[in-house]
Image (cartoon, helix red, strand yellow):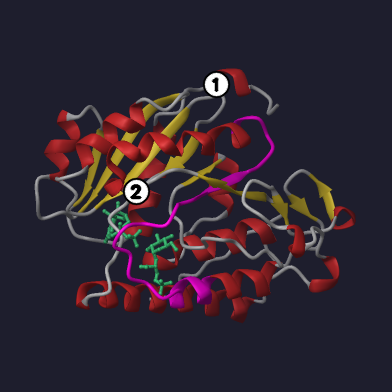
């Protein structure tokens, strides 16, 4: 069990752009997750009533006056949550969830115990098949291959945004990759820095992108942002060298923690001895 785990609390951070329809039920569900004592919504320049609906539902709300993208909203949320950490108490775990989960958001609860108990530094939700989803696995495949090439880990759902992580892990992964590249970049950075990542099945429903024009435009933006996050890391040589990799990728499955470096390469928890860099600054490469 992680030191101080019994008293450790969780901040739920919800990036939200034009989510007035679903944000209230998502917040109510998030408040019911054990250990959660702060639900924070970052209204990312919404043109609808998201901020007021969220406040009425009991969340702490901060707002970007202009839309800055999901990754920026996550960074803002984490900063505001840090201001609310209590001196002398363990720093809150961060549980990032999307605003469109509605009442199923409570099903992200299984992401917390592995991190609270020190079995993983970051957990990632694996969703069941979503009604109406129209993707063909192109962006997912790009992200999965890139993570696998950089770290040896082949996640089931590399784009999943429902993630619980320690403050230490989050700080290591910042600045985050822009926009829709955030999940892919974060996973690579955490594994390269020596942290342990675990996928956890969660019975969630979200507003899946259909196979229509809006869905294809969304996937186009996802593809662009994932490709930028990946190329920024390739340029910097952010990877775990194949000869230093630990866990056998053939044994990977949701529910099993993954650590990219072999035991011999790791000096202490979370510190890879010859990691090419525990922090990636994408600022100059990504737009
Ligand atoms: O510019 C944006 C776009 C999206 N979002 C939020 O990011 C989350 C994920 O977005 P979405 O559900 O549209 O994407 P998906 O996960 O389905 O690809 C949601 O809570 C959005 O409201 C955001 O904060 N800023
Ligand atoms: O929009 C989608 O259908 C995919 C991305 O498109 P692809 O099907 O990979 O071309 O991404 C969504 O599905 C993922 C699950 O595989 C989720 O993890 C993503 O959050 C979601 O955007």
Instruction: Determine if the magenta segment contains residue 124.
Output: yes
In the rendered image, residue 58, in percent from the top left (x then y), is placed at 23, 27
Say if 3 sits above or below 220 in the image.
Answer: above
Residue 196 or residue 106, whichever sits in front: 106
Which mark is drawn over residue 205?
2
Quadrant containing the C terminus is: bottom left
User: Which residue corresponds to the image point at 45% horizontal and 78% vertical from the top-left?
Assistant: 138
Say if 131 sits above or below 228 in the image.
Answer: above
Give the mark nearer the N terminus: 1 vs 2: 1
Q: Secondary structure at mark 2?
A: loop
Please give the residue where the numbered disc 1 appears in the rendered image: 89
Structural crowding at the residue carrying mark 2, measured as other residues with C-alpha within 10 Å and reported as few (<14), some (14–19) or many (≥20): some
In the rendered image, residue 252, in percent from the top left (x then y), is placed at 70, 57
Instruction: Determine if the magenta segment contains residue 275.
Output: no
Which mark is drawn over residue 174?
none
Residue 84 or residue 161, whichever sits in front: 161
View quadrant of ligand 2: bottom left
In the image, is 177 to the left or to the right of 47?
right
Quadrant containing the N terminus is: top right
User: Which residue corresponds to the image point at 52% horizontal and 71% vertical from the top-left?
Assistant: 143
In the image, is 190 to the left or to the right of 40?
right
Quadrant assignment, res 236: bottom right
Q: Nearer the viewer, mark 1 or mark 2?
A: 2
> What span is colored magenta in the figure?
116-143
């Amino acid at each position: 069990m992680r030191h101080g785990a019994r008293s450790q609390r969780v901040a739920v951070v919800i990036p939200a752009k034009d989510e007035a329809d679903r944000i209230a039920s998502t917040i109510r569900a998030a408040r019911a997750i054990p250990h959660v004592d702060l639900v924070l919504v970052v209204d990312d320049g919404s043109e609808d009533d998201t901020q007021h609906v969220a406040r009425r539902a009991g969340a702490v709300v901060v707002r970007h006056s202009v839309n800055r993208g999901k990754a920026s909203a996550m960074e803002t949320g984490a900063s505001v949550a840090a201001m609310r950490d209590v001196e002398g108490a363990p720093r809150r775990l961060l549980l990032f969830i999307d605003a469109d989960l509605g009442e199923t958001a409570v099903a992200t609860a299984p992401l917390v115990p592995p991190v609270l108990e020190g079995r993983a530094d970051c957990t990632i939700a694996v969703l069941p098949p979503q009604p109406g989803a129209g993707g063909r696995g192109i962006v997912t495949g790009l992200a999965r291959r890139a993570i696998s090439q950089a770290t040896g880990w082949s996640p089931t759902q590399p784009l999943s945004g429902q993630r619980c992580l320690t403050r230490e892990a989050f700080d290591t992964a910042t600045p985050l990759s822009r926009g829709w590249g955030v999940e892919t970049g974060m996973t690579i950075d955490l594994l390269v820095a020596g942290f342990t990542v675990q996928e956890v099945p969660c019975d969630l429903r979200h507003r899946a992108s259909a196979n229509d024009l809006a869905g294809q435009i969304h996937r186009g933006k996802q593809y662009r942002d994932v490709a930028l996050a990946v190329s920024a890391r390739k340029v910097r040589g952010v990877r775990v060298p194949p000869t230093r990799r630990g866990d056998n990728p053939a044994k990977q499955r949701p529910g099993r923690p993954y650590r990219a470096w072999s035991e011999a390469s790791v000096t202490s928890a979370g510190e890879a001895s010859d990691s090419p860099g525990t922090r990636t600054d994408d600022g100059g490469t990504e737009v």
